Structures are given as C-alpha cells and as structure tokens.
Amino acid sequence: MKTTDEDLRLAIEDLKFDAQGLIPAIVQDAYTREVLTLAYMNEESLRRTLSEGETWFWSRSRASLWHKGETSGNTQRVLRVTADCDGDALTVLVEPKGPACHTGARSCFHRQVEGREDNERGETIEPRELGELLKQLYALILSRRKERPEGSYTTYLFNKGLDKILKKVGEESAETIIAAKNEEPLMLVAEVSDLIYHLLVLLVERGVALEDVAAELARRGGERSKE
C-alpha cells in the first residue's frame, strides 16, 4: 500500500497526551540534529509553538506556560514538529538563538554520566565529588562574569544585576519546595541543581568565595561535635 502525504500528517487532537495532559518534546538543532533539551508541552503550548513559530512549553514545577527565551532572549525558531509512530512524543526542529540550557551551555545534555561500572577497557569509573563539581562550576561562572560572552544565560543574569539574581534564587527555591512535594525524586534533583547554580551566581556577584562557605560549614560542624 502506497503511503500518501495525508497518511504522514497528524492533527493535534490525535496526539496521545498523558494523564496530566502533557507530551514530551525533544528539541533538536535543525541542522546538526544535536539534542538541545527535553521539555513537555500541553495542547495550548503546542498550538502556540505551531502558530507563533517559537517554542512554548509547560512547566511542571510552576504549573504554567513558558516561552523559551522570554527573559534570556535565547529563543528557538521552529522549523518542523513531528510525532513518533505512536503519537505520544514529539521532536521539534529549531534554529536556536543562543544556548538552550540555563547554565549557558549550548545543550542541556552536556554532562557525562559516570558510575562505578567497569568500562570497555576494564577500568573503574569513579563519580566526581560534589566539591570538585562546585569548584569547576564556580570557576566557570566567575569567567562568565569577567568575559560576558554574548548569548550566555549567566551573562544575562550578571548584566541584569543583583535584583534579577535574587529573584531567580527565590523562584528556584520555590520550585525546589514544589518538587519536594512531588513523588518524582529526579524532579527534586533537577530543581536542587538549578538552585545551587543560581546560588553560585549570587556568591560570585557578591564576591563570596566557596572557601568562605566551606570554612563556615567546617566551623559549624566543629561546634556541633562538641554538643
């Protein structure tokens, strides 16, 4: 049987949204096919995406619509939206204007997953310590503040100033609380990671070193050990 163009088209009403009315959307660079992010859409955000030509999503933590790039300017021009064979997942091909990730990275998928499993050469891969990761991220944020590369979300925060950074810390704190009430541990992990990132931006903005925080925690630990 020959497949026609009509067979390859799918109405929004025919998509399979989940019980919460959401459908996962994989956003890819239209030219490199690099995966930029994974987000969720409801029917309204999908309709806006198709009608306005820029990506709109549904924030599960805030329970609201959000327009990618509305505050950062890192919008995504939509070239094509396709559904999988079951109609329960989407791919969105875009021309990105700036990084997709709030950390300033081009893609949200930029962190290599490590574990204790043996790799193909028989070596044991140890996970990096949190302290090491915090130092590396702090150093990156410090360089962003100094160099102010165009298109970076971190640059955007520093350009906006302390009040904007404090507002984001407040928003991420609220989202962490909401995620903690949810039964999905990965959502809490994601929100805590966002909060830590914005706290590091705040520390850099105020000229507070990680060593200062470490010294204070060590002092408090020493006091409690005497109790």
Image (cartoon, rainbow, N blue to C red):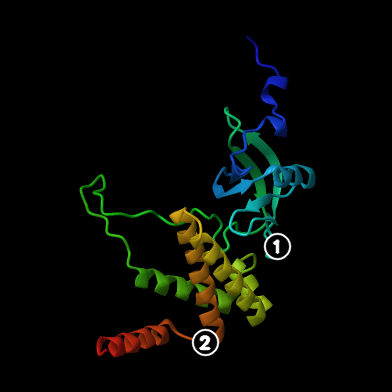
Which residue lies at the image location 67% right of the left edge and 44% below the top edge? 42
Indicate whether 8 appears above or below 132. above
What amino acid does circle 2 point to?
Answer: Gly
SS category of the residue bearing label 1? loop
Indicate whether 111 appears above or below 85. below
Query: Of the numbered discs in the image, which one, if any, rests on residue 207?
Result: 2
What amino acid does circle 1 point to?
Answer: Gly
Residue 135: percent from left, percent from top = 40, 74
Q: Between residues 227 and 7, which one lies in front from this camera angle?
A: 227
The quadrant in which the C terminus is found is bottom left
Which residue lies at the image location 36% right of the left edge and 87% below the top edge? 215
Q: CB atoms at circles 1 and 2 under 8 Å apart?
A: no
Residue 130: percent from left, percent from top = 36, 69
Name the image quarter holding residue 16: top right
SS category of the residue bearing label 2? loop
Name the image quarter holding residue 89: top right
The quadrant in which the N terminus is found is top right
Which residue lies at the image location 27% right of the left edge and 55% below the top edge? 125
Indicate whether 79 appears above or below 13. below
Q: CA distance from mark 1 to mark 2?
A: 27 Å
Indicate whether 74 appears above or below 146. above
